[in-house]
Image: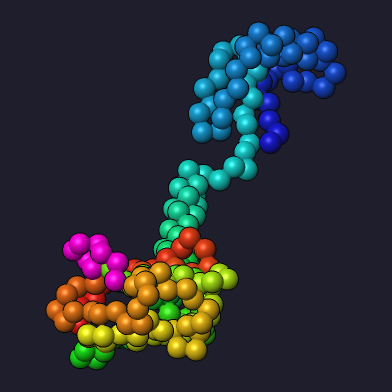
């Protein structure tokens, strides 16, 4: 930004007029006012600086601010959708859990994206109303990879996990080979991964 000088005394602007130059300098320091081109209000008897600026005009700054705000809003909305989609796929919960019921048979899916085994460290089934635990199994050496397991109305084997059942220690029921899910009762199924994260769902057979 470079100022232009407009002197209130043009007759002193003659070449070699030292007295005029000193007078203008004195008037400049006495006045000390700087006016913009949009508001040139000179003070009589002083030097006025007219400032030339390359700064964007007010409407242009407002438009630029609006465009940046819109871009930020679009990015934020896109991020929310991506995170929501990832959450539905179970990327923030280990393992994922969704139930598929066919009459009196329930399949608990713990696989990811329909084809990848997931680590499961603990399985618990309890009555929704009373909270009584009817089945619980804990991994002997941490989590083991599972795909799904089935529950049926009535008697169920404690070896829910099929071939991987040997990797789990059944806590409830103790000393029995089966447990019972009563028809019409609501139950809560909780599945833990290899850490403190878990998934929970309710069902009735």
Please determine whether, in this image, residue 9 is positioned above or below residue 127: above
Residue 73 x %, y %: 43, 58
Q: In which quarter of the image is residue 135?
A: bottom left
Residue 107, position as x, y percentages in the image: 33, 86
Q: Which residue corresponds to the image point at 78% horizontal and 15% vertical from the top-left?
A: 21
Q: Is residue 130 left or right of residue 61?
A: left
Q: Write down the region rendered in magenta.
A: 127-134
In front of the other: 60 or 166: 166
* Residue 158 in sight: yes
At x 35%, y 78%, the residue is 176
Q: In this view, does 105 lie to the left or right of 21?
A: left
Which residue is located at x 60 percent, y 22 percent?
Answer: 34
Total tally of numbered discs in the picture:
0
Q: Is residue 131 magenta?
A: yes
* For residue 64, above or below residue 58: below
Query: Could you say which quadrant of the image residue 43 lies in?
Result: top right
Q: In which quarter of the image is residue 55?
A: top right
| Quarter that holds the N terminus | top right
Q: Residue furthest front?
A: 175
Position of the C terminus by quadrant: bottom left
User: Relative to 84, is 102 on the left or the right?
Assistant: left
The residue furthest right is 16
Q: Residue at left 20%, top 62%?
A: 130
Residue 199 lies in the magenta-colored region = no
Q: Looking at the image, which is closer to me, 75 or 201?
A: 201
User: Considering depth in this image, is 187 or 180 the residue closer to the camera?
Assistant: 180
- What's the coloring here? rainbow
Image coordinates of residue 120 in percent, x first then y, are 48, 74
């Amino acid at each position: 930004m470079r100022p232009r000088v407009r002197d209130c005394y043009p007759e002193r602007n003659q070449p070699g007029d030292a007295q005029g130059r000193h007078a203008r300098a004195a008037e400049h320091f006495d006045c000390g006012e700087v006016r913009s081109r949009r508001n040139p209000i000179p003070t009589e008897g002083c030097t006025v600086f007219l400032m030339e600026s390359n700064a964007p005009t007010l409407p242009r700054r407002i438009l630029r601010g609006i465009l940046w705000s819109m871009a930020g809003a679009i990015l934020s909305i896109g991020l929310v959708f991506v995170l929501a989609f990832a959450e539905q796929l179970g990327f923030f919960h280990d393992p994922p859990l969704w139930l598929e019921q066919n009459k009196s048979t329930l399949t608990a899916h713990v696989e990811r994206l329909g084809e990848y085994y997931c680590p499961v460290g603990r399985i618990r089934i309890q009555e929704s109303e009373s909270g009584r635990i009817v089945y619980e199994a804990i991994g002997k050496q941490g989590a083991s990879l599972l795909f799904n397991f089935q529950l049926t109305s009535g008697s169920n084997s404690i070896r829910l996990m099929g071939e991987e059942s040997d990797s789990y220690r059944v806590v409830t029921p103790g000393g029995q080979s089966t447990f019972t899910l009563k028809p019409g009762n609501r139950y809560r199924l909780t599945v833990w991964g290899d850490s403190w994260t878990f998934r929970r769902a309710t069902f009735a057979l």
